[in-house]
Each structure stands twice: as structure tokens, then as C-alpha cells.
Image (tube, rainbow, N blue to C red):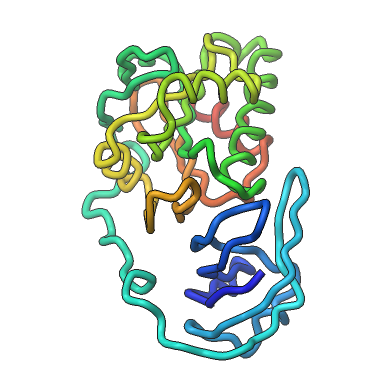
């Protein structure tokens, strides 16, 4: 894969690359990529042109054999970051959210789930990286199965996956995707809303979404998963993708007390 370094995150062993098309896998876009050895990032700087080897399995992706091939100034659209949200939710805050449309094509609100612990995450169905949105689906499926098997959590927890790709992720698309990942309608809802509404709500939880084009995979984003108490207040936020199903279930148990 070839591309240009946009940003380095050594602490997370990641580099964000504006890459060229990977034939048969994904279109040209900007995405974060993991490295297993920090030495792969040594000497790199934003603007560097690189060639890398991309590994993809059913559950993860990473790059290695990173080789600098040149340098050029970053295009303005790659350096313009979205403004930070002005009013982040803190633990204990009431979580107010917009009205969504569920996978069944009907209005859906978080307020309708009062009395239950709610886990909310953000994805889009076209995400091509197995350790981003597909990983959130797998973690929620594992947690769903754990909740259904638990005498203390069963009937007390609901999972919500919100898509930030509303133009593509219509109710029909979300319903088909929910079926593929094994979501039970009684405990796990997929939903979406107008882009501005999802971005504003997600932004208050620390979500950042950049849309560089209307291409199927022209979206760059981070990951945020929030746990909300039965009273509708924020309990905790799981950041990124390195949390485990055990950590999510523990957060659900903590919020239910």
C-alpha cells in the first residue's frame, strides 16, 4: 500500500495515512493503521510518502515494512481537524440525545430505555478495517450473549449501535447488518439520524468523524463506547478499541448498581 503520513500516534502504536486505493479491498481514503513494532515509525513525520505492507485477518489489521519514499506538503483538507466539542459529557451528567430512526424505520430515543443500563457505540456498516467497526459489532455480540446468560443483567441492559453514515445506512441496510452480526432486537438496536445530529451527540462523547468524500469508505473516525445508567446519566466511556468484552460487562454491572 502507498500513501502519505498524516499524523503519528506513537503512544497508541498508530500512524494515520492518506493512502491510495488498495485494489480489491478498499478505496483511497485516510485511516489510522496499527504497527506492532514502534521501530516501524522511527524517522517518520507528517507529509512523508511511504510504502507499507498491509496485513488483514478476520479480526485485526496492521502494517509493517514501512519505507519512506519521499515527502510533500500535506493538502489543506488533511490538516484541517474538526473543531473540538464545546461541551463534553462528564460522568454523572444527564445524557441528552437526538431522536434517531431505528433499523425498523421507526423513531427511537435513548429516553425510551430509561430503567435499563444502555451501552452506546458508533460505527458504519461499510467500515473496511476489522479492528474498528466490525470489532465493535463482535464485542457487542459477545456482551449481548453474556448479558442474556446472566441472571443479574438479563432484561436490565440494552445495546445501541448508532451509524454516522446515514446516507448509506438506511433502516433496511441496518436491519440486514444487524441480522448478520446476530443482534437480538429485544436487547440490541441499530439506528441512525441526520449527520449533524449524530456528529453533535457523538462529539459530546469524544467521537470525531471526518468525511473526506462521498466514496463508500471515505470516512475517518475514532471509537467511543458509552455506558449510561438506568437514570439516563453517563457512567463511563470506553475509548478506542483496546477494551475487552470483560471490561464492557464490568462497566454494565457497575452502572446497574
User: Which residue is rendered at x = 65% and y = 13% of the image?
Assistant: 148
User: Which residue is rendered at x = 72% and y = 82% of the image?
Assistant: 39
Indicate whether 235 appears above or below 113.
Answer: below
Indicate whether 193 appears above or below 4.
Answer: above
Indicate whether 19 appears above or below 153.
Answer: below
- List the single residue furthest toward the front: 23
Q: Is residue 256 visible?
A: no
Q: Is residue 164 visible?
A: yes
Looking at the figure, which quarter contains the N terminus? bottom right
Residue 234: quadrant of the picture? top left
Residue 129: x and y in percent read: 62, 50
User: Which residue is rendered at x = 53% and y = 77% of the image?
Assistant: 5
Residue 106: x and y in percent read: 34, 12
Indicate whether 38 appears above or below 34.
Answer: below
- List the single residue furthest toward the left: 86
User: Which residue is rendered at x = 69% and y = 68% of the image?
Assistant: 35
Residue 192: x and y in percent read: 37, 29
Residue 248: quadrant of the picture? top right
Residue 205: quadrant of the picture? top left
In-front residue for pair 3/208: 3
Amino acid at each position: 500500500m502507498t500513501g502519505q503520513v498524516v499524523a503519528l500516534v506513537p503512544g497508541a502504536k498508530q500512524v494515520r495515512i492518506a493512502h491510495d486505493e488498495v485494489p480489491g479491498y478498499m478505496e483511497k481514503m485516510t485511516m489510522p493503521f496499527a504497527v506492532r513494532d514502534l521501530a516501524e515509525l522511527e524517522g517518520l513525520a507528517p507529509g512523508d510518502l511511504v510504502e507499507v505492507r498491509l496485513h488483514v485477518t478476520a479480526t485485526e489489521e496492521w502494517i509493517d515494512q514501512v519505507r519512506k519514499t519521499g515527502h510533500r506538503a500535506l493538502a489543506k483538507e488533511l490538516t484541517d481537524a474538526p473543531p473540538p466539542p464545546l461541551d463534553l459529557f462528564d460522568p454523572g451528567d444527564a445524557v441528552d440525545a437526538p431522536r434517531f430512526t431505528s433499523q425498523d424505520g421507526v423513531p427511537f430515543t435513548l429516553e425510551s430505555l430509561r430503567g435499563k443500563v444502555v451501552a452506546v457505540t458508533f460505527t458504519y456498516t461499510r467500515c473496511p478495517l476489522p479492528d474498528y467497526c466490525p470489532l465493535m459489532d463482535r464485542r457487542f455480540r459477545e456482551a449481548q450473549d453474556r448479558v442474556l446468560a446472566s441472571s443479574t443483567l438479563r432484561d436490565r441492559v440494552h445495546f445501541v449501535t448508532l451509524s454516522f453514515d446515514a446516507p448509506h445506512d438506511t433502516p433496511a441496510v441496518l436491519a440486514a447488518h444487524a441480522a448478520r452480526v446476530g443482534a437480538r432486537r429485544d436487547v440490541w438496536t441499530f439506528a441512525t439520524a441526520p449527520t449533524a445530529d449524530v456528529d453533535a451527540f457523538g462529539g459530546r462523547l469524544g467521537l470525531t468523524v471526518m468525511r473526506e468524500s462521498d466514496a463508500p469508505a471515505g470516512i475517518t473516525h475514532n471509537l467511543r463506547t458509552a455506558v449510561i445508567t438506568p437514570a439516563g446519566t453517563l457512567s463511563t466511556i470506553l475509548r478506542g478499541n483496546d477494551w475487552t468484552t470483560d471490561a464492557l460487562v464490568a462497566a454494565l454491572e457497575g452502572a446497574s448498581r
